[in-house]
Every structure is written in C-alpha cells, then in structure tokens.
Image: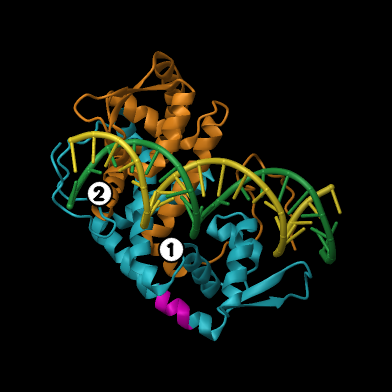
Chain colours: A orange, B cyan, C green, D yellow
Amino acid sequence: MTANTLGKRTGRKAAAEKTEPARFGTLDGMIGFHLRLAQNASFKAFKRHTGEAKLRPGWFAMLSLIHENPGITPMALSRASGRDKSTLTPVLRDLQRLKLIARETVASDKRSYTLSLTPLGETKFATLAEHAAAHDRELDEIVGDRKDELIRLLKRIHSVLD
Amino acid sequence: MTANTLGKRTGRKAAAEKTEPARFGTLDGMIGFHLRLAQNASFKAFKRHTGEAKLRPGWFAMLSLIHENPGITPMALSRASGRDKSTLTPVLRDLQRLKLIARETVASDKRSYTLSLTPLGETKFATLAEHAAAHDRELDEIVGDRKDELIRLLKRIHSVLD
DNA sequence: TATTGTTATACTCTATAACTATA
DNA sequence: TATAGTTATAGAGTATAACAATA
C-alpha cells in the first residue's frame, strides 16, 4: 500500500492521491451526479469562506432576498428561495433574535406580515455579501467565460423540474 | 389576495403564480445559489422517478461505483463518491443487509475489505439504472446540446474546490 | 373553503472526533 | 506514526401533516 505522505489540508483532499481513481461508468455521463458533487464542493467552499463570519449557509440567501425585496412576506420568500414555508420559520426566528430583520404587521391581511432588514441587518448583510462574493469569485474563476451559460442552464433545470 | 385556482401537482409548484416574482439582486449572478436550486430540483425529480422503486438517492451512486469497480474498497469508494468514509458505513450495512453487495477480506491488508455486487445486486442495479437513466434523460432534454459543456464545468467545480 | 404562518416530526446527506485494529 | 474502517454525535437542508387564525 503506497502511503500518503501528505497530511490533510483544511478540508481539501490530499493533492497527490497515489491510488488510481475509480471508473465512473454511466455515472460519468449523468448530469445529476455531477450536479451533486459540484454543489457539495461549492457548499463546503462556501463554509470555508464564511465560517469565520458566523454566516450560516442558509442565511445569506434569506438576507439577500429581504434586502432586495423589503416588505416581502414569508410566503413570497418561500417561493423565491425554493424552500417550503415551514423551513423559513426557524431561520426567521434566528434572524430576528439577532436583530437583523424586523417584522411588521400588514393591515390588508392579518395572517401575514412583512419583512425588512434592520440597520444592523443591512450592515451585517454588507459584510456577508463580501464573503459570499469572494466565494462566487472563486467559482467564477473556475468556469471562466462560461458563467452566463452555466447559470442559464442551472436556472432552466430549476424552473423546469421544480 | 388573488386566489390560486390550481391544486398542487405532485411536488411541482403551481404553474400560474399570480404574485409577481421577487427580485434576486446580486444573488441572480451567483453560481452557488443557482447550483443549489438546480441540485435541489434535480434531487426532488430523482425521487419522483425512483420513489416507486424504493431507491434511496444515496444508493444508486454506491451501487454504480461498485458495479463499475468490483473489488473496490470503502476508502476508494469514499474518494470516488466525494463522501467522507464515515458516511459509507451505514449505507454499506444497509446494502449488505439487503444482500445487494458482498464483502470479502483482502489478504494484503487485514484492515480493509473489497466490495462487489451480488447477482441480486446486479439485477437490482440494472433496474435502478433504468430509473436513474429516465431521470437523467429529463435533465438531458433540458440542457440540450450543452450537456457536455455543463458536465465539464460541474466536474471542474468539484475537482478544483474539493 | 383556501391560504398564511407555526409547530411537530422525520428523513437525507454530510462532517468531525474518538476509537480499534492493523500497517 | 499513519491508515482503514466503525461508532457516536451533530448540524444543515429539506419535506409532510396537522393546526389556528384569517381570508
């Protein structure tokens, strides 16, 4: 057994893997498989970038959508983020506990309420956006000039399948 | 509030959403965000295709890799599937309990063992592969002739980041 | 009757750390 | 010392179903 002389380097796999890679077969031509691998790798990289800033992965999209759509309701947020409404409750509770978002009752519908970022939330969002941007720049470098093409395809997958 | 007259159609969002969509802002240009949405949509579609066949999402890649690489060890499987070795243990236990895979001790290293599909495992794999292929054909239709390009980009994201 | 938001519950995928038995 | 595999534990993301309040 060829020993691996390299230690683990903060979440990335050892560079010089001596064992020959496995064959992927039909898996190699499957979009779904590579989608999962890429998303997982991106997710881990995102945590590397934002972990220090105490940014929970699910938070950034929420803060960003509320920032862009002040007065948005949880239901609209659910649709925009592609997550079930029930998954929003704990996230919004956490964000409010941290005073990053504010809820306001809406006269026209007493069941619902509107969401907006507090000044503190805006400040925090700006910081988080920098980290997220750094992450996405890393992705940008990888895909190069095919970025628009890639996003277009990913959007289409989401909109057609979901 | 404009009422939505359409019922839910097995996991897909209502077609004619009357509420105007939210603005995405910078999120719209972020690869990571769309990667998550696309992967999630693909995952849900995969479950729609394979749910009847009792195919747990994580199983197909495992069976496929063992099928393609008979005699592969758990560690090699871990690297190939992009999952930590500790996450393989319960999956392999389940697959063995169902008599789909077989373990064999390897003389050269008593710590490890090799994996292969049983005849039953091969049969089951063939069935599952059909369902998975149906799913991927759905993805193929969506991306059209950009499939190779897409897979190339996804592979690069995975290999560079992980 | 239908919808909004909450709660309860559960499932999947994933990771880290500590452990054993080897190497 | 380092590696293979297991176990224990935890966290993130997600979903469904039932519920109360309101539309």
In the rendering, at what x and y percent does residue A67 appear?
Answer: 33, 24
Asked if residue B71 is among those painted magenta in the image, a careful observer would answer no
Q: Chain of mark 2?
A: A
- Secondary-structure class at tag 1: helix
Q: Is residue B70 visible?
A: no
Q: Is residue C14 left or right of residue A147?
A: right
Label 2 or label 1, whichever lies nearer to me, is 2
* CA gap, disc 2 and disc 1: 24 Å
What's the mark number on residue B52?
none
The single residue placed furthest to the top in the displayed view is A119
Circles 2 and 1, Cβ within 8 Å, touching? The answer is no
- Magenta residues, as a range? B123-128
Of residues C12 and B160, the one drawn nearer to the viewer in this rendering: C12
Q: Is residue A36 left or right of residue A85?
A: right
Q: Give the residue pinned by disc 2.
A: A159
Callout 2 and callout 1 share a chain = yes
Q: Give the residue pinned by disc 1.
A: A28
In the rendering, at what x and y percent does residue B129 appear?
Answer: 40, 73
